[in-house]
Amino acid sequence: MRYDRRNAWWQRSALSVFLLGVTACGQTGDAPSRLAYINTSCENASPLYWETDPNGVVHIHLVYDQERSSPNRANGHWLFEIQATSGAELTLVLHNFDNVWNGKKGSPLDNRTIGFLSEDAKTWRVVPLETTKDNCLRFRVTVRTGSLFAARLEPYRLSDLERLKERIQGKPHVDITTIGRTVEGRELEIIRIGRPGAPNRVLLRARAHPWEPGGSWVVRGLIERLLRDDEDTRRCLGRYCVYVMPMANKDGVARGGTRFNLLGADLNRKWDQPPDPVTNPENHALETWLKSTVSKGQGPQLMIDLHNDNSGKLHVSRPDIDLEDYLAKMKRLEAALRKHTWFTEGSTTASFRNPGSIGEGLLERFGIDACVLELNANWIAGLDDYPSARNWELFGAQLCEALYHYFEDRAS
């Protein structure tokens, strides 16, 4: 039998969590807590409230964000700092994962859901989590230094984006253009790498949903790879340029949201019509920029919207139009991803439709070959490894070569 280190890890972890849970939640009476505080003043921290039960278990109740004119609600992001006595061993339970998506009840959790811990909010390690019968997450931590950060995934924050922009501003082949502002007035930008007159152009968008940092790490890896002054970079930028919207939902990221903007708009919905500039200024800014580039003959021929989920598939759009040419191109894109990146999960089936998503909207309304690429938030099958910033940056670097071959038959 093949040794599966992921399953072995989960089996050991589940046993450890079970035994620790028995100790923490057994007949111990009023156990004093060594917890001092759950701190949510750190950047990208989750809105939450917390309480400690008589057995010393810390219950953290995440606060939903909700969609406008809809029953939809979402939780899936957590980031907070545990402040406690040095050496304290704590059991924590995360609550409120009874989400509603597209009017249907659901949960972002499954038996593979993982989390991350860090003493300095910079270097992160995987922590085992137990999904309980009542749709909560339980885990045990040791606070060695008096402070410990807990997160769903390795965070990519506004400050990380600002440092990236400062590092690349003024470099050859780089242009950073402000295209609008969020509900709270934060600047939205498009970063262009390469010549706008290149024979091919691709648009990448990250972070439409704030809890999904994988896309931000991917575009960082892609940008930094394309800024190397080597033969491969020159070859790629001779064939295409890249437009990047690195953080579409900045307000949500800043406030620790999960899915919607601050006025309840889902930035991956209602692309079958022009976005409302009042309730959805983020999508309105992107569409206004897109129309401008198309009018100049410099619009993208390909658009990839980057997300995180539990499957990692390429979501191929299927609106009610002639799809023969588009589906052939998506097949070519999938083949390029499989050959030149660690992507292995494949694409959605022929019965798949997601009306209103940016993939369907840009294809139907603008004729742009658009898709949604989900990055598995629990396990990277192609690497046999857990998701991490390093692995997602690697994918971004590999994507440069995949795009080169995708555009091969269009090369001039």
Image: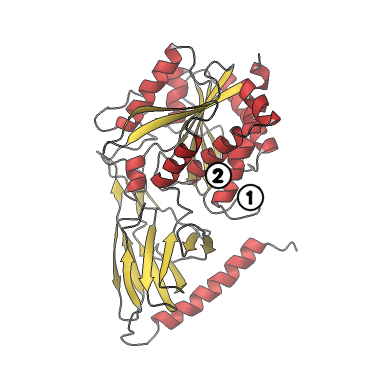
Of 141 and 380, which appears nearest the observer? 141
Image coords of residue 62 (percent x, y): 32, 58
Q: At 42% across and 12% down in the image, what residue appears? A: 295
Q: Can residue 42 be seen in this view?
A: yes
Residue position for label 1:
381
Circle on res. 323: none
Q: At 67% across and 18% down in the image, what residue appears? A: 409
Q: In this view, does 235 lie above or below 135?
A: above
Q: Is residue 348 visible?
A: no
Q: Judge left or right: residue 7 versus residue 180.
A: right
Image coords of residue 137 (percent x, y): 42, 64
Type of residue at label 1? Ala
The way the protein has been coloured in the rendering is secondary structure
Mark 2 residue crowding within 10 angstroms, few (<14) / some (14–19) / many (20+):
many
Q: Are marks 1 and 2 in contact (CB under 8 Å)?
A: yes
Q: Distance between the residues labelled 1 and 2?
A: 9 Å
Q: At 27% across and 36% down in the image, what residue appears? A: 185
